[in-house]
């Protein structure tokens, strides 16, 4: 185990990494800026070309901050769900929530072009998906890991099929590209207004999860065992389900479906700070922020046209998942 | 002190798993629960701990009916020691023991230094301090079982409920766990209920024994409950219960001979 003093060092490093990637991401792009220019614009010192100011404030800053928040949130969700289901291979994808949220967004795009409708639908179906998975896996008052993963797969498959159906009937000129692009995840449209909309809701959800971070240790034990330690397992589960579903649904509704972040980042964080959720949760938040900022910067600067995020997160995330599977031998205990 | 009156339980409301079981265990006493596989030992334990709802009967802890206690009042008095199984996430031994203080850690807080110090002191007392910073998953079954006992003790309960604590252990570790159980009950005045598959452990370590059967049960002092006749009746095993004297100490042994 790492001594407390070392944790401070690790967290300082992770925070520095996050700030470093943020600044670097704002500098990098087809219209490149120097670090000093970025600092001058951000802190409003001295005279800077108008175009550069616009590039930073209207395009890169909101987008980078959004990437940081979504990355941090999805990693946080991954950690919490993995603890709650006592399974290091769980993510919002495996439990079907991402698919049901994605279906909600697709349905919203089909029916209306109003952003609030799209977000509302993404949120609503996010909850429906999570509830279905949870209820289906309940047997004799407990949800075994294998039942959860199976019911999540079922729920995910159903919503994936429904999404395909929506794509099938969508107008191929206008709606279909919008839906397809959305489902692959992108931060391209992020504006300052979006960031300000997302911050309060996601902020509260993250705060709630941060408050119960130590309790996640207890909840990850067997249900009776956790209850016998005097923790209200049911309430804690409800808190985790509500907060994580809010986060996933919001991030899907703003940036589409971004896969593998919630699975890969918590595992990377485990390698650095260990399993104690008191440290694992904040470490995952910091690392998830850096991770998605880096991925997004690559996505928008690698080629002339942007690469959808999920393509890159999966290309990086899948090998990590493979290593994880290989390491545990697929024999995660029930 | 724990007293149970006429406990009855059924999963479906029709067929009772057990019926009208009564027992009482005083402060500092150990009660062993014996019975063949599938007679509902674990189910009864889970009912006592309120994980399953009783169909009928009452449980009293230190004189108060547990139905009237809130979860936190209930778990302040009772600790549960589950069977040692490896964890999904390998927490350190110290973290594992601190979890025993969960109900005293307020919502939104993490345990303070005093809690970690308290846990470390208990580990020292139990001779486990050298493992404090090791992952629970790197321990042997016996060591992990001792850690789980430490976690149960750290909230200073009146009653300890142990679910087959010696089941997956070798002979030496079985003795270690049973000795520490005896020590705890005597030194700390803790009432212990232990679910076990070993009648000879019950004879040697418990004051009282409850033997569960499909339609009946026996509850008595261990020496009176664990007899050749009852072993035959409840386990369908012909056995000999014999006395031996070693270094002027009297012991009783059980020799299983054949099954019916």
Image (tube, grey):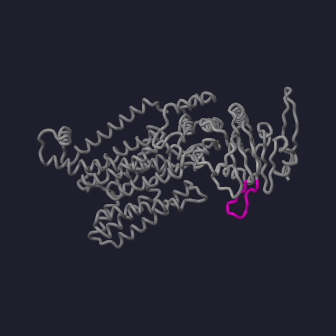
Out of A297 and A93, give the one closest to the viewer.
A93
Q: Is residue A261 magenta?
A: no
Q: Quadrant of residue B178?
A: top right
Camera sees residue A113: yes
Q: Residue furthest top?
A: B247
Q: Position of residue B134 (x, y in %)?
A: 55, 33
Residue B231 point in image, percent of width and height: 84, 48
Q: Horizontal and vertical percent for residue B52?
A: 64, 54
The answer to whether B137 appears left or right of A250 in the picture is right
* Residue drawn at (78%, 39%) of the image: B207
* Residue A271 at x, y percent in the picture: 45, 39
Please tell me which residue is depicted at 28% across the width and 52% down the height of the picture.
A196
Magenta segment, principal secondary structure? Answer: strand
Q: Which residues are magenta?
A: B7-20
Q: Nearer the viewer, residue A208 or A26?
A: A208
Front-most of residues A101 and A181: A101
Is residue B18 a member of the stretch shown in magenta? yes
In the picture, measured across the screen, residue A90 lies left or right of residue A174, that is right
């Amino acid at each position: 185990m790492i001594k407390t003093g070392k944790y401070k060092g690790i967290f300082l490093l992770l925070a520095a990494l996050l700030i470093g990637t943020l600044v670097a991401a704002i500098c990098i792009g087809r219209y490149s800026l120097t670090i000093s220019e970025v600092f001058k614009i951000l802190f409003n010192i001295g005279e800077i070309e108008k175009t550069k100011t616009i590039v930073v404030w209207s395009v890169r800053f909101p987008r980078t901050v959004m990437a940081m928040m979504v990355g941090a949130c999805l990693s946080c969700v991954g950690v919490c769900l993995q603890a709650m289901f006592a399974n290091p291979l769980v993510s919002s994808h495996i439990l079907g929530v991402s698919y049901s949220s994605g279906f909600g967004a697709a349905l919203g795009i089909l029916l209306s072009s109003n952003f609030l409708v799209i977000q509302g639908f993404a949120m609503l179906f996010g909850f429906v998906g999570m509830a279905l998975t949870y209820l289906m896996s309940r047997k004799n008052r407990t949800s075994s890991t294998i039942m959860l993963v199976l019911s999540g797969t079922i729920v995910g498959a159903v919503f994936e099929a429904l999404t395909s159906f929506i794509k099938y009937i969508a107008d191929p000129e206008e709606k279909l590209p919008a839906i397809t692009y959305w489902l692959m995840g992108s931060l391209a449209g992020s504006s300052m207004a979006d960031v300000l909309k997302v911050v309060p809701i996601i902020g509260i959800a993250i705060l709630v999860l941060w408050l119960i971070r130590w309790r996640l240790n207890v909840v990850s034990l067997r249900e009776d065992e956790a209850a016998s330690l005097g923790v209200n397992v049911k309430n804690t589960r409800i808190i985790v389900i509500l907060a994580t579903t809010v986060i996933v649904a919001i991030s899907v509704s703003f940036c589409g479906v971004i896969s593998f972040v919630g699975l890969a980042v918590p595992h990377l964080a485990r390698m650095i700070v260990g399993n104690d959720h008191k440290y694992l949760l904040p470490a995952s938040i910091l690392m998830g922020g850096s991770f998605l900022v880096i991925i997004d910067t690559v996505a928008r600067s690698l080629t002339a046209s942007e690469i959808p995020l999920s393509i890159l997160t999966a290309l990086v995330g899948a090998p990590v998942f493979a290593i994880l599977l290989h390491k545990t031998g697929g024999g995660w205990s029930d | 002190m724990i007293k149970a009156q006429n406990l009855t339980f059924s999963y479906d409301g029709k067929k009772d798993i057990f019926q009208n079981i009564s027992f009482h265990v005083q402060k500092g006493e150990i009660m062993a629960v014996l019975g063949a596989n599938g007679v509902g030992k674990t189910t009864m334990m889970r009912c006592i701990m309120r994980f399953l709802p009783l169909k009928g009967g009452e449980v009293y802890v230190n004189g108060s009916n547990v139905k009237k206690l809130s979860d936190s009042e209930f778990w302040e008095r009772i600790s549960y020691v589950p069977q040692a199984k490896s964890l999904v996430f390998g927490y350190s031994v110290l973290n594992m023991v601190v979890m025993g203080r969960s109900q005293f850690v307020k919502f939104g807080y993490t345990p303070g230094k005093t809690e970690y110090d308290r846990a470390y002191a208990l580990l020292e007392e139990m001779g486990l301090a050298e493992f404090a910073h090791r992952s629970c998953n790197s321990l042997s079954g016996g060591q992990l079982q001792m850690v789980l006992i430490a976690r149960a003790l750290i909230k200073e309960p009146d009653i300890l409920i142990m679910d087959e604590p010696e089941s997956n252990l070798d002979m030496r570790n079985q003795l270690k766990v049973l000795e520490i159980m005896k020590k705890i009950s005597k030194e700390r005045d803790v009432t212990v209920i232990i679910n076990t598959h070993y009648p000879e452990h019950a004879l040697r370590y418990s004051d009282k024994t409850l033997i569960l059967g499909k339609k009946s049960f026996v509850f008595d002092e261990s020496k009176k409950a664990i007899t050749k006749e009852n072993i035959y009746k409840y386990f369908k095993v012909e056995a000999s219960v014999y006395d031996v004297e070693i270094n002027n100490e009297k012991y009783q042994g059980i020799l299983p001979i054949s099954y019916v």
